[in-house]
Amino acid sequence: MANPKLLGLELSEAEVIGADSARFEELLLQASKELQQAQTTRPESTQIQPQPGFCIKTNSSEGKVFINICHSSSIPPPADVTEEELLQMLEEDQAGFRIPMSLGEPHAELDAKGQGCTAYDVAVNSDFYRRMQNSDFLRELVITIAREGLEDKYNLQLNPEWRMMKNRPFMGSISQQNIRSQQRPRIQELGDLYTPAPGRAESGPEKPHLKLWLEAPDLLLAEIDLPKLDGALGLSLEIGENRLLMGGPQQLYHLDAYIPLQINSHESKAAFHRKRKQLMVAMPLLPVPS
């Protein structure tokens, strides 16, 4: 819940930055038009042929289930973070790390005993897969995320216990998959939108550089550069339906950004990336009323 006193003080500046906010909205609409134009001139998806990796066995109420963990260089890699940084993000239940995956359709197969079973193909980036081979932690994390992703996509309830198939890298055959052929364009880097008016000396906390982009039609991501900080201690972050308000420790930083989109503030999450000295924010968007 946002601090009403703090928001009240910042709302008095809305008239000053009104023109900049309008400019941001114009740039956002321009990016949307560019995205629509790109979608009409390029295919929205492209077919890939994942390469086999390893296979795990689990089960559901309908019987045995096999998950083929595959890889492809066409799938983007996750952010380059150390296992220590990743473990900290997971312990704090933050959304600063995502593993791009392609979840294939279920296909019926026969196991070694000739009994029916269901197999799913899940593909990750090839370079990340090679890194995962040398890390039990990353391998178990990928399996967990893949299992939860399949449960959400296909309304399944999979047994959390599994075992890896020793002499079988995949079950059945690995089919081609459709993936999004291009990343969505950046909306706008906001570093120049909230600068002081000409002839006015800047005083008080520094306004950090902010980057926003649409990761999906219903997900807005943000990166806030905080080079003077080594960690998240003392940071404050409030997110409203169309506003992002951040304060730094010892008044080092202050950011008040108007965002002309309807944000689901209750589901938004943030994580501080120590190596890059960035605050990363994931903001799901509310559906547009019809």
Image (cartoon, rainbow, N blue to C red):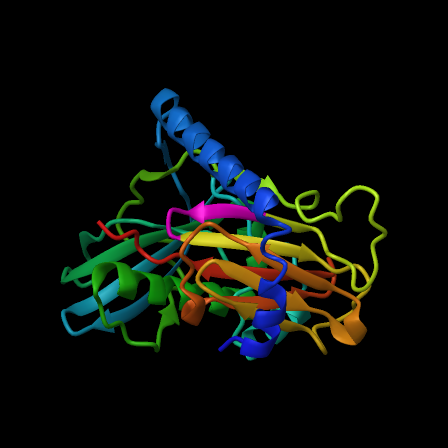
Q: Is residue 208 visible?
A: yes
Q: Residue at x 14, y 69 (%)?
A: 62
Point out residue 186 in the picture as x, y percentages from the top left corner. Answer: 55, 40
Point out residue 36 in the picture as x, y percentages from the top left corner. Answer: 38, 30
Q: Residue at x 34, y 76 (%)?
A: 160
Q: How many marks?
A: 0
When asked about the image quadrant of residue 56, the answer is bottom left
Residue 67, compared with residue 144, is above or below; it is above
For the residue pair 80 and 10, the one nearer the viewer reads as 10
For the residue pair 39 and 145, the one nearer the viewer reads as 39
Point out residue 200 in the picture as x, y percentages from the top left corner. Answer: 82, 49
When asked about the image quadrant of residue 131, the answer is bottom right
Q: Is residue 3 visible?
A: no
Point out residue 187 in the picture as x, y percentages from the top left corner. Answer: 53, 40
Q: Does residue 277 show up magenta in the picture?
A: no
Q: Which residues are magenta?
A: 212-218
